[in-house]
Image (spheres, helix red, strand yellow):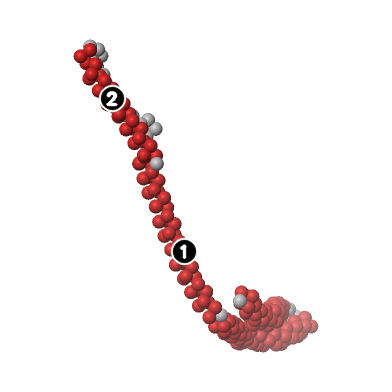
Amino acid sequence: MLMETNFVFQILFDQAQRSVKQQLHTFVKEDVRKFKETKKHFDRVREDLEIAQVKNAQAPRSKPHEVEEATGTLSITRKCFRHLALDYVLQINVLQAKKKFEILDAMLSFMHAQYSLFQQGYNLLDEIDPYMKKLAAELDQLVIDSAMEKRDMEHKHATVQQRTLMQAAFAPSSSFHIPQLPIPLIWHSSAAAGIRTRISSYNLRLSLWGHNKALTVNK
């Protein structure tokens, strides 16, 4: 599809080259150049006419041959100037007339090239319209699947974090301490022997209970 589209654009470029650039280049190269050359001749003859008029006016009347020569030169120069003036005016009119339809014709050819481009582009896109619709449906499904996958990953992530926090909360401490009842130093008499024995027995039961509690939590 991309190759066909590129080919269509290449056709438009070629048509634009032929319709616009080549026609305008021919117009500038031939007609405008001819007009410029005619203008140069016209300017040169006009200067010669001015010089002939000055010489004719300054010719001494006492010398008939110089007056006759100046008059003849002025007459010839005037005829040449009139002829070139007519050519120059003709070239101006021709250039103005051709400028109108040459440029318009070039633009019309370019518009035809644009029309051909859009027509071929429409036909090309119309042929691949079913494929574009299928691709759009697959893209929509891909977006939905991606959103569901993202939601599942976020849910799994939250579950793992919650499980980690619960394990950390119920884990046994590394320094599990069971408080024991202190035995006062003053109880060293035989009367307090029974009490000290009961307290020691209580402390021993507390230690065994704490040990069993730690084993249960670890399980």
Return the residue nearer the eye: 142 or 33.
142
Residue 39: percent from the left, percent from the top?
68, 79
Number of residue marks: 2
The mark closer to the camera, 2 or 1, is: 2
Name the side, left or right, on which 176 lies relative to 68.
Answer: left
Return the residue nearer the eye: 136 or 22.
136
In space, the residues marked 2 and 1 are separated at their CA atoms by 66 Å
Q: Amino acid at mark 2?
A: Ser
Q: Quadrant of the C terminus?
A: top left
Residue 162: percent from the left, percent from the top?
37, 49
Residue 46: percent from the left, percent from the top?
68, 79
* Label 1: few (<14), some (14–19) or many (≥20) C-alpha neighbours in 10 Å: few
Which mark is drawn over residue 201?
2
Visible residue check, residue 84: yes
Asked which secondary structure carries label 2, the reply is helix
Q: Amino acid at mark 1?
A: Ser
Question: What residue appears at the point 39 percent right and 48 percent down from the top-left corner?
Answer: 163
The quarter holding residue 23 reads: bottom right
Visible residue check, residue 78: no
Asked which secondary structure carries label 1, the reply is helix
Question: What residue appears at the point 61 percent right and 76 percent down from the top-left corner?
Answer: 1
217 versus 105 height, above or below: above
Which mark is drawn over residue 146?
1
Residue 211: percent from the left, percent from the top?
36, 32
Name the side, left or right, on which 210 lies relative to 64.
Answer: left
